[in-house]
Amino acid sequence: MAPHNVIVIGDKCTDKYVYGECKRISPEQPVPVLDKTETKERPGMAANTELNLRAFGINTVLLSQREQITKTRFVDSNSGYQLLRLDETPEVSRIANAELKMAFMHMNPDAIVISDYDKGYLSEDDLWIVCNNINRPVFVDTKKRRLFQKDNVYWKINKKEYDDLVQDHLPDDDHLIVTLGSAGALWNGMIYKPEPVKVFDVCGAGDTFLAALVYKFLKTNDMRTSIMYANKAAAIAVTHPGAYHLTKKDIESIGEKNEGN
């Protein structure tokens, strides 16, 4: 089968990890001192979602802001404990209509994925306009508090985001997926539980879940199957440190697990 085409829209960032050894307390203030040993950088937020989609062999175009958002995490290498996270978030320019039109000129997408971290690239109006002017599946992961019902739009949010929603702005149950961490995912009145794994870091697990969900749905058009597959993908992501995107070996292992079930 030819690979699917997907346009990804949303805020991106650089996830920066400063690793070091923490062996002493500062004499100036009662705070730990981190002796840096290495620094790593990875694409985060919408960029991490795009990388995971590419790992599944999907052709992608990413529409995102020009401004640089950076999340820097200071981590003790011995314990894996995160001592501090420093966010640098400038004022972000909004998406322009021409950007989406240009993307459609270069790609005939099978689906749209919106990874909206609500940093300013997409306003509520932008989200509404994009979803209501596209006649193919749209998958939305958003931190906004007002959602809406549209037959081709599927929402993926976590439990905290669900609790913060304005309750009179909800889509139908079969268009809303709520991830519950280690408890699995809620969809259409049912909870789909994942296999238990040892969690190392949940950073970026939602991006992995979303990408796997989209990939499987485009192949099967079956949401139940897609959620169970996405659970397996996210379970792999949380066993790795930092924002992790799947490898070919990871994806092959998910296939083997499916065959086992």
Image: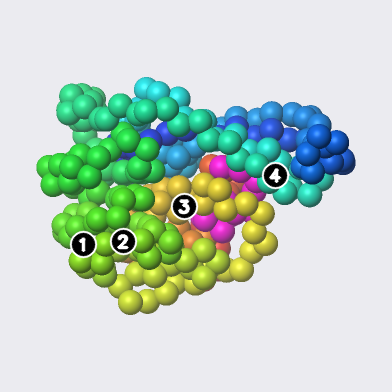
The answer to whether 146 appears left or right of 163 in the picture is left
Marks 1 and 2, Cα distance to the nearest angstrom?
Answer: 8 Å
The residue where tag 1 is placed is 169
Residue 218 visible in rendering: no
Query: What residue do we see at 30% from left, 73% from top?
Result: 188
Q: Are marks 4 and 1 in contact (CB under 8 Å)?
A: no
Check residue 206 in the rendering and tell me which mark sits there, or answer none. 3
Task: Assign a secondary structure to mark 3.
Answer: helix
Residue 76, given in percent of the width and then of the height, sits at 76, 42
Q: What is the crowding at mark 2: few (fewer than 14 residues within 10 Å), some, or many (at least 20)?
A: some
N-term-proximal mark, 4 vs 3:
4
Of mark 3 and mark 1, the one earlier in the sequence is 1
What kind of residue is marked 3?
Answer: Gly
Give the distance between the C-alpha atoms of the residues marked 3 and 1, in whole angstroms: 22 Å
Element type at marker 1? Answer: loop
- Percent across and percent down for residue 177 are 35, 63
Mark 2 or mark 4, which is nearer the start of the sequence? Answer: 4
Q: Is residue 178 above or below residue 113?
A: below
| Residue to which mark 4 is pinned | 83
Q: For the view shown, which residue lies furthest in the bottom direction?
A: 189
Q: Which residues are magenta?
A: 233-243
Labelled pair 1, 2 in contact (Cβ < 8 Å): yes
Report the residue marked by disc 2. Answer: 165
